[in-house]
Image: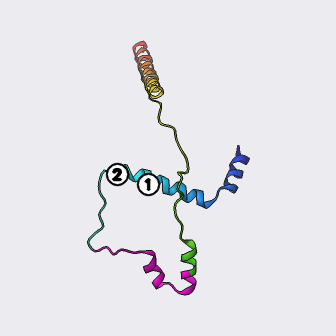
Amino acid sequence: MGKNGQDFMENLSMDRVYDYMFHLISEYSKLQDFKPAPPSTALEVCAESLLCLADPKQREYLERATTAPSPSPPCSLEPANGSFMKSWIEKKKKTIEDVRVMLEKNALRR
């Protein structure tokens, strides 16, 4: 298992990591229940404004470092199976009830 994990990490590209991070943040942002608004003192910064302040070596690096997210998501999950979730919840409730009954029986024996 350790060797497989090591092999996976050696073959993992940073592009996939960045795609996953972008996907994760995008999905998480959908859960926000407020509309973010910039403060009145905020200034918009764009790539061109950063390049204006950069020296030639920094400009070259910044131009090479520009990336875009992958068009495909890093993973795809099937929709949740409702009947599976219901049966799992019922099993969980039954287990909790069984433990409660066992604890009550043990308390009565004392």
Q: Residue furthest bottom?
A: 55
Foreground residue among 31 and 1: 31
Query: How many angstroms separate mark 2 from mark 1 (CA)?
Result: 11 Å
What is the x, y in percent for residue 14?
61, 61
Above or below, 70 relative to 1: below
Above or below, 67 relative to 9: below
Q: The N terminus appears in which quarter of the rendering?
A: top right
Could you tell me which residue is drawn at 47 percent across and 34 percent down?
Answer: 80
Q: Residue furthest left?
A: 40
Q: The C terminus appears in which quarter of the rendering?
A: top left
What is the x, y in percent for residue 29?
39, 53
What is the x, y in percent for residue 104?
40, 17
Foreground residue among 50 and 98: 50
Above or below, 99 relative to 18: above
Residue 26 is tagged as 1
Residue type of the residue flagged with mark 2: Gln
Q: Residue furthest right?
A: 3
Q: Nearer the viewer, mark 2 or mark 1?
A: 1
Residue 32 is tagged as 2
Q: Tell me where the magenta segment starts and ends, as one range.
A: 41-59
